Image (cartoon, rainbow, N blue to C red):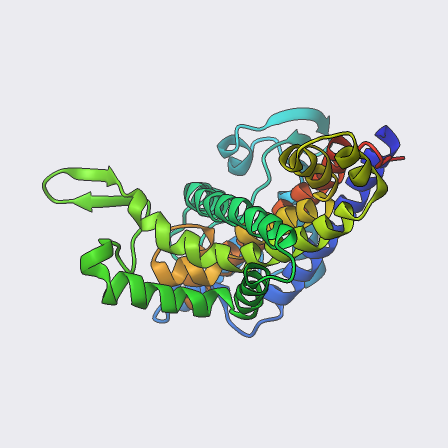
């Protein structure tokens, strides 16, 4: 178990290093000038030169790459009296020659070109909105998807089964951004007087009289739009896996011993049919946490997705790079957690 975990961590770190390298190369071969984006189009040559020096743009690309890795790494080499070390409240691990030191620190993602705020601070501020939206959408999709899958399996070859399959195929075929546009227009515009839901809105709203207040109703439409596709996938996987499990000998033995259908289904059949569902749930949760960009943008929901789309529109490359790396870490951690969860759900799984 320990060797397996260490092997997965090593593999995850290699994947993360590959993502870091690819992101750095993509955003450092673009024709746009980051210094001009930061200082403005009418900046004088001296200001642009100072900005390029501050961003290390006057150095070769391989030097910039090493500096980027050093900033991202939790252990890096810095001047012991540098301002960046003081800002990150870092700890000195080992003094090095030339007034340098080996520093234990938080990863540094740089500063936004537009706001000059730390990228990590911007992403941390937007993270709760994305997490809440993804968890709400995934909870809705998992509960309803499993129930529909169980119902379709128990009512095989009936109109309930065919209807569930047809709805799941339609849900899989509909992209989230297209579903978001339809849902926002239909429920937030046409039926607004009945639903009371808005086309756009975030978790917190500001009222000139009452001030800042929580607006959970703005969560309903984006969570519904984001959860349609995983709901359809989970329903189909649950139906298929449960039908396969119900044909096993131990299910027939349970019925022969007099167990009721509900106990047989929910105590014996369903837990053993959940492995592919767990894979789907974990994969979709990672995707919803990392890929709800357009749904957040359509509904005006403040999260990492909307922040990233806005940053792309404004050529704010450090913020985009930080968001990509952050979402990559989410995928890696959730996939690792899923592998370990298999052993708890199904004792037949052995991790070596």
Above/below status of 212 relative to 29: above
Q: Residue furthest left?
A: 209
Q: Is residue 236 left or right of residue 273?
A: left
* Coordinates of residue 203 in the picture (x, y in percent): 33, 45
- Tell me what residue is drawn at x 31 percent, y 68 percent: 185
- Tell me what residue is drawn at x 30 percent, y 47 percent: 217
* Coordinates of residue 153 in the picture (x, y in percent): 65, 53
Residue 137 or 44: which is nearer the viewer?
137
Residue 350 or 129: which is nearer the viewer?
350
* Coordinates of residue 331 in the picture (x, y in percent): 65, 48
Residue 65 in sight in this render? yes
Q: Quadrant of the C terminus?
A: top right
* Coordinates of residue 46 in the picture (x, y in percent): 43, 63
- Tell me what residue is drawn at x 45 percent, y 63 percent: 294
Residue 323 or 51: which is nearer the viewer?
323
Quarter of the image holding residue 152?
bottom right
- Tell me what residue is drawn at x 51 percent, y 53 percent: 54
């Amino acid at each position: 178990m320990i060797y397996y975990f260490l092997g997965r961590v090593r593999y995850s770190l290699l994947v993360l290093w590959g993502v870091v390298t690819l992101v750095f190369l993509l955003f450092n071969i673009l024709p746009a000038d980051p210094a001009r984006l930061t200082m403005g189009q009418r900046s004088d040559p001296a200001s642009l030169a100072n900005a390029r020096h501050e961003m290390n743009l006057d150095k070769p690309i391989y030097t910039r790459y090493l500096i980027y890795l050093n900033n991202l790494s939790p252990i890096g080499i810095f001047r012991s009296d540098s301002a960046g070390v003081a800002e990150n409240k870092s700890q000195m691990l080992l003094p090095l020659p030339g007034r340098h030191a080996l520093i234990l620190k938080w990863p540094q993602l740089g500063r936004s070109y537009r706001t000059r705020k730390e990228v990590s601070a911007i992403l941390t501020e937007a993270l709760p909105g994305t997490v809440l939206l993804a968890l709400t959408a995934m909870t809705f999709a998992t509960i309803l998807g499993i129930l529909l899958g169980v119902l379709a399996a128990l009512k095989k070859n009936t109109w309930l089964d065919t209807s569930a399959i047809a709805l799941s195929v339609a849900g899989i075929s509909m992209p989230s951004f297209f579903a978001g546009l339809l849902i926002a227009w239909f429920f937030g515009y046409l039926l607004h007087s009945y639903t009371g839901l808005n086309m756009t809105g975030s978790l917190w709203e500001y009222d000139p009289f009452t001030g800042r207040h929580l607006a959970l109703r703005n969560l309903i439409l984006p969570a519904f739009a984001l959860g349609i596709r995983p709901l359809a996938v989970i329903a189909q996987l649950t139906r298929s896996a449960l039908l396969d499990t119900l044909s096993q000998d131990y299910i027939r033995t349970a019925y022969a011993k007099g167990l009721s259908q509900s106990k047989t289904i929910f105590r014996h059949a369903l837990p053993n049919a959940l492995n592919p569902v767990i894979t789907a749930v974990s994969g979709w949760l990672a995707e919803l946490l990392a890929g709800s960009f357009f749904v957040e943008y359509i509904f005006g929901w403040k999260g990492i997705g909307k922040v990233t789309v806005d940053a792309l529109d404004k050529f704010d490359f450090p913020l985009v790079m930080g968001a990509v790396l952050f979402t990559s870490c989410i995928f890696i951690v959730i996939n690792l957690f899923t592998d370990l969860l298999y052993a708890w759900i199904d004792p037949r799984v052995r991790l070596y």
